[in-house]
Image: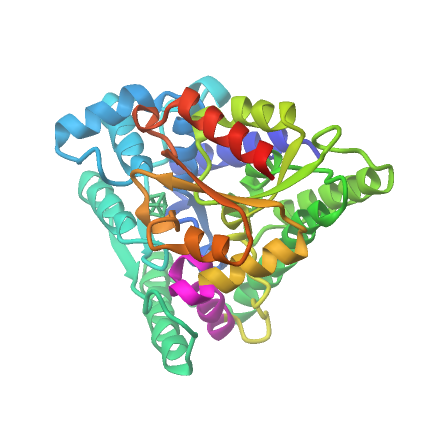
């Protein structure tokens, strides 16, 4: 199944939905309860995905300064500033990619602060701008363990959200619809986990840079048959590549773990840099963020509450350290690269001594400075030098 077609169909349908008075569009954060929205008949748009598109196309370099001038600091999430700046300028990469004039107007905005609080500020701006209702899920954050009381708290917030959605749609939630979207989401996310695990093979059939592209449907189409079917085909294809020993990085000799956000505007050049050094980035915190194997269609709300609280970004230091160590073992990693993204401290794990703790136990680790979108915070030369020197020492 063609990835480009999957994403094109998704965006074109969303555009149609926004123009159709009989259909409703919800905006949702990337690790928000998209399953609930889909079960209630909403089409779902993910502003972070739009931010990543602005980053990958480097259009953000025109739009971030616009948001900065408008009063959004250059130090906060550059998805937010890219996206608000694009809105202020009246542009979107969707126009060039799919001929879509503008982002879909929201009927409701739903955020979840399980990842950070920037999403709240971001969605609040657009709620004011579109005069649309907004609903925030505020789970317990930075938890060592997910406790029953945490789950009960988030379930009751989900129930409040459902009441709001029911009022908007003028009908009650059908339990079978929620079970179905939860089941589809679980199937897709389990397949996504298997896709990423093919990188345990030597040589790996895919790298982090491939996965940042393959991950589109698990972010924007969770809870649909399209996402599930896409990952079924992709997994079959990757298994064939593993059997045939097709390498993502020909001559793979070093295996790297990437922690933190991608540098969206430099995916291609970074991929080439690693390739030319026979190093393959085989695992990452980022791509694993959309693995929700705890979803259970027979117990949808509690299992979704658990899975969405449990995510890596919402955990304490010890959990994060143990998680990375586990992946270092499983993927036979030679070294860990930490991307310290200037505008996303939430997803940068190098600032609280974690690289030093790994090094102490003989796991090589290095830090590069950069950003997810704002290339003013990133130096090609500096990063290449650090990465090449690091790979050399492994
Ligand atoms: S986690 Fe980071 S990149 Fe994602 S929305 Fe929050 S600040 Fe932005």
State the residue at coordinates (68%, 48%).
195
Above or below, comparing residue 368 to residue 112 in the picture: above
The answer to whether residue 311 of the structure is visible from this angle is no
Above or below, comparing residue 276 to residue 177 in the picture: above
Q: Residue 341: horizontal and vertical position, in percent?
A: 35, 39
- Considering depth in this image, is 380 or 28 the residue closer to the camera? 380
Query: With 196 as the anchor, is 266 left or right in this view?
Result: left
The answer to whether residue 109 of the structure is visible from this angle is yes
Q: What stretch is highlighted in magenta?
A: 301-319
For this orientation, the residue located farthest to the right is 244
Above or below, comparing residue 181 to residue 237 in the picture: below
Image region (quadrant) for ligand 1: top left
Q: Quadrant of the C terminus?
A: top right
Q: Is residue 312 magenta?
A: yes
Q: Quadrant of the N terminus?
A: top right
Q: Is residue 261 magenta?
A: no
Q: Quadrant of residue 36?
A: bottom left
Query: With 203 as the anchor, is 319 left or right in this view?
Result: left
State the residue at coordinates (45%, 60%).
320
State the residue at coordinates (57%, 24%).
273
- Considering depth in this image, is 236 or 279 the residue closer to the camera? 279
- Considering depth in this image, is 43 or 96 the residue closer to the camera? 96
């Amino acid at each position: 199944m063609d990835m480009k077609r999957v994403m094109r169909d998704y965006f074109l349908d969303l555009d149609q939905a926004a123009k159709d008075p009989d259909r409703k569009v919800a905006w949702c954060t990337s690790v928000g309860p998209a399953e609930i929205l889909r079960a209630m008949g909403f089409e779902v748009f993910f502003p972070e995905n739009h931010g990543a598109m602005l980053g990958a196309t480097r259009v953000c370099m025109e739009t971030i300064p616009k948001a900065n001038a408008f009063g959004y600091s250059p130090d906060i999430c550059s998805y937010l500033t890219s996206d608000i700046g694009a809105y202020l300028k009246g542009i979107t990469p969707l126009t060039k990619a799919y001929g879509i004039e503008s982002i879909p107007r929201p009927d409701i905005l739903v955020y979840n602060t399980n990842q950070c609080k920037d999403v709240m500020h971001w969605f609040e701006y657009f709620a004011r701008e579109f005069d649309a209702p907004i609903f925030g899920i505020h789970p317990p954050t930075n938890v060592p363990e997910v406790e029953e009381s945490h789950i009960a708290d988030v379930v009751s917030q989900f129930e409040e959200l459902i009441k709001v959605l029911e009022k908007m749609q003028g009908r009650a939630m059908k339990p079978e619809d929620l079970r179905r979207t939860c089941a589809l989401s679980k199937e897709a996310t389990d397949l996504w986990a298997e896709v990423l695990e093919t990188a345990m093979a030597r040589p790996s059939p895919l790298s982090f840079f491939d996965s940042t592209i393959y991950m589109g449907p698990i972010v924007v189409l969770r809870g649909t048959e399209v996402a599930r079917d896409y990952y079924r085909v992709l997994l079959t294809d990757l298994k064939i590549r593993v059997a045939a020993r097709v390498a993502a990085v020909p001559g793979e000799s070093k295996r790297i773990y990437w922690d933190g956000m991608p540098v969206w505007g430099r995916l291609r050049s970074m991929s080439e840099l690693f390739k030319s050094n026979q190093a393959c980035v085989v695992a990452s915190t980022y791509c694993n963020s959309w693995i929700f194997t705890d979803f259970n269609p027979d117990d949808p709300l509690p299992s979704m509450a658990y899975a969405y609280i449990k995510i890596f970004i919402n955990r304490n230091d010890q959990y994060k350290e143990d998680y990375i160590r586990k992946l270092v073992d499983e993927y036979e990693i030679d070294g860990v690269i930490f991307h310290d993204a200037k505008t996303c401290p939430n997803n940068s794990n190098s600032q609280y001594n974690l690289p030093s703790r790994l090094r102490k136990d003989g796991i090589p680790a290095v830090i590069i400075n950069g950003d997810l979108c704002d290339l003013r915070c990133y130096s090609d030369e500096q990063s290449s030098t650090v990465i090449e020197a690091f790979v050399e020492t492994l």
